[in-house]
Amino acid sequence: MIDDTVKQLAQQPNFAALSTLMPDGRPQTHVMWVDADDEHLIINTELHRQKARNVERDPRVTVTVIDRENPYHYAEVRGHVVEVVRGDEARAHIDQLSQKYFGQDYDPANIQTERVILRIQPDEVHVR
């Protein structure tokens, strides 16, 4: 079960910082759209992106979800990617995220490769 505060923050139109590990061990961080279900944080990206390649090699990640109304309220989740979902489900999910953040479907012209969902299992949670 995911922490209620984490789930609430991730299901609202708040942004998250996703940190993955580069091949040389340096962290890489991107500001991302985020989502959650009852057990996982959910990130949607594309297969060709460095973050997708990073988690394929090393599934450890940190996701910090920041309350857009109060940036001093946030949740940091240290965890690991337990599943990568491809295909129609990932493509439909990016439309859901775009609706959440912008009120319209995702522009298919922005898709360069296959969309993928990263399901992240929390190992450690810090809420402020």
Image (tube, grey):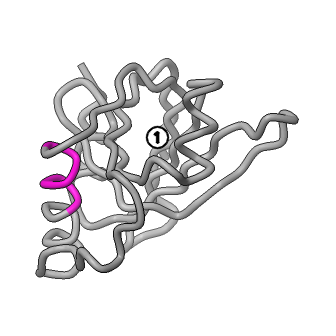
Which residue is under mark 1? Answer: 127
Residue 83 x/y as whole percent? 35, 23
**Residue 40 in the figure: left or right of residue 75:** left
| Residue 21 placement, left or right of 79 | right
Q: Is residue 24 above or below residue 108?
A: above
What residue is shown at x 26% (from left), y 67% (from top)? 13
Q: Disc 1 on helix, strand or loop?
A: strand
Question: Which residue corresponds to the image point at 13% horizontal and 75% vertical from the top-left?
Answer: 105
> Where is residue 95 drawn, in percent x and y?
16, 65
Q: Position of residue 94 (x, y in %)?
A: 23, 59
As rendered, which of 119 and 48 lies closer to the eye? 48
Start-end of magenta stretch: 89-94
Q: Nearer the viewer, residue 101 or 73?
A: 101
Within 10 Å of disc 1 (Cα), the crowding (few <14, some 14-19, many 20+) is few
Q: Is residue 90 within the magenta segment?
A: yes
Name the magenta segment's main secondary structure: helix
61 above or below 15?
above
At x 62% / y 45%, what residue is drawn? Answer: 19
Task: Count all numbered tags in the image, as a single digit.
Answer: 1
- Residue type at mark 1? Val
Q: Which picture quadrant has residue 56? A: top right
Q: Nearer the viewer, residue 57 or 29?
A: 57
Q: Is residue 30 left or right of residue 36?
A: right
- Image vertical order of residue 123 relative to residue 77, above or below: above
